[in-house]
Image: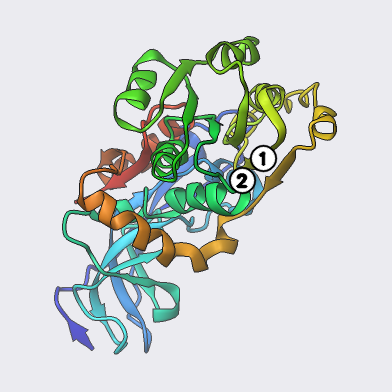
């Protein structure tokens, strides 16, 4: 066994202990301490350092996550000990055994990261991670954004939205419009995240707000919200417009699902394309994203917009805050 640090004796994990009805609460989670078993042959002991908390996890709480069991999530950690020739102490690795202070992993369960000068390690959870990859796939594979086109992005200040606008600008978009929840975020969108226009959405008024900003219509829509935001985009999309359906945060904790957009038949009348996708089906695009983005990050042309909460004991708080829009950019928990 290769060793660089003394192995901890215990592991601290978060379990989900009950199912939420509506918004999740702190009492739906419990911190659990367990004794770490000895490493099995071919395993490495990883100290988890950076944790991603994501909107999709709210859906997991309704049944995908087992109760009273370790949770999952995108995580970056450092190898402490290893009985595998493929993983060495000091290696930084990306894996999915999050919501715990330590993980015991085999080489096929991790991706070894190669830190790049001028690029924060947390970027592999944000603009170079699942959120950035989601934005890249939405723009280049699903909506097929072309130079000179205009697009609208809902939940514009979130992890995907903050990445998507910067990528769209690099791809030559003419107008990039975003909706968000408050004026402070709207200012961030236009001042540092590549948006040409941003507005604070008002329930019942989104279609009118979008039409007022870009009356000529949009070519592409990236939907992170669903509901009224999708309805507004359908109304504003030009003939043969395309929409990439990414998430539906408006209904994740809703006690009743929102009414379907009233104008769905306009999809037929305008010959629109609305396509959903799962980023896990596009992992082969990761290297393409990194090759494109890392030089721009190093040159200061792209920023990894992140809201970092410090302390593993704050992971539940950070997750709940993210669901209520408490973050700008990617929500991350760090113990560094």
* Image spot of residue 260 (x, y percent): 78, 26
State the separation of the CA atoms marked 2 and 1.
Answer: 5 Å
Residue 219: where, in percent of width, then height?
62, 34
Judge from the rendering whether residue 291 lies leftward or rightward of residue 222; answer left or right: left
Q: Is residue 117 above or below residue 314?
A: below
In the figure, is residue 277 to the left or right of 48? Answer: right
Q: How is the image coloured?
A: rainbow
* Circles 2 and 1: CB atoms closer than 8 Å: yes
Q: Secondary structure at mark 2?
A: loop
Q: Is residue 235 above or below residue 129?
A: above
Label 1 secondary element: strand
The residue nearer to you, when weighing 294 against 323, is 294
Residue placed furthest toward the front: 148
Name the one closer to the observer, 281 or 216.
216
Say which residue appears at 20% left-offset and 49% top-offset.
299
Q: Which mark is residue 143?
A: 2
Residue 73 visible in image: yes
Q: Residue at x 23, y 78 (%)?
A: 81
Residue 66 visible (yes or no) = no
At horizontal 35% and vertical 63% (from top left) the residue drawn is 291
**Residue 242: assigned label:** 1
Determine which quarter of the picture holds residue 322. top left
**Whether residue 80 is situated above or below residue 329 in the rendered picture:** below
- x, y percent for residue 120: 22, 52
Nearer the N terminus, badge 2 or badge 1? Answer: 2
Judged left or right of residue 259, residue 48 is: left
Q: Position of residue 245 (x, y in %)?
A: 64, 41
């Amino acid at each position: 066994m290769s060793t660089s640090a003394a192995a901890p004796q215990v592991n601290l994990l978060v379990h989900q202990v009950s199912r939420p009805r509506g918004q999740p609460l702190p009492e739906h989670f419990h911190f659990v301490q367990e004794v770490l078993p000895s490493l099995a042959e071919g395993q490495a002991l990883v100290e988890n350092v950076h944790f991603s908390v994501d909107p999709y996890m709210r859906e997991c709480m309704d049944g995908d996550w087992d109760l009273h069991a370790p949770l999952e999530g995108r995580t970056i950690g450092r190898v402490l000990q290893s009985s595998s020739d493929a993983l060495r102490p000091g290696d930084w690795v990306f894996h999915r055994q999050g919501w715990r202070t330590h993980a015991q992993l085999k080489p096929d369960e991790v991706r070894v990261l190669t830190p790049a000068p001028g690029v924060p390690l947390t970027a592999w959870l944000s603009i170079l991670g699942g959120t950035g990859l989601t934005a890249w796939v939405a723009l280049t594979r699903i909506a097929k954004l072309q130079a000179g086109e205009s697009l609208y992005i809902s939940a514009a200040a979130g992890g995907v939205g903050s990445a998507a606008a910067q990528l769209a600008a690099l791809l030559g978009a003419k107008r990039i419009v975003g909706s968000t929840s408050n004026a402070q975020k709207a200012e961030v969108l236009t001042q540092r995240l590549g948006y040409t226009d941003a507005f604070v959405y008002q329930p019942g008024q989104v279609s009118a707000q979008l039409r007022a900003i870009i009356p000529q219509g949009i070519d592409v829509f990236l939907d992170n919200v669903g509901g009224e935001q999708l309805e507004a985009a359908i109304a504003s999309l030009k003939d043969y417009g395309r929409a990439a359906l990414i998430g539906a945060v408006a209904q994740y904790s809703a006690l009743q699902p929102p009414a379907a957009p009233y104008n769905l038949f306009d999809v037929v009348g305008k010959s629109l394309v609305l396509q959903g996708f799962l980023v896990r089906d596009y992992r082969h695009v990761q290297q393409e994203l990194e090759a494109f983005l890392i030089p721009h990050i190093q040159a200061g042309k792209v920023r990894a917009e992140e809201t970092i909460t410090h302390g593993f004991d704050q992971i539940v708080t950070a997750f709940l805050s993210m669901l209520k829009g408490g973050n700008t950019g990617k929500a991350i928990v760090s113990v560094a």
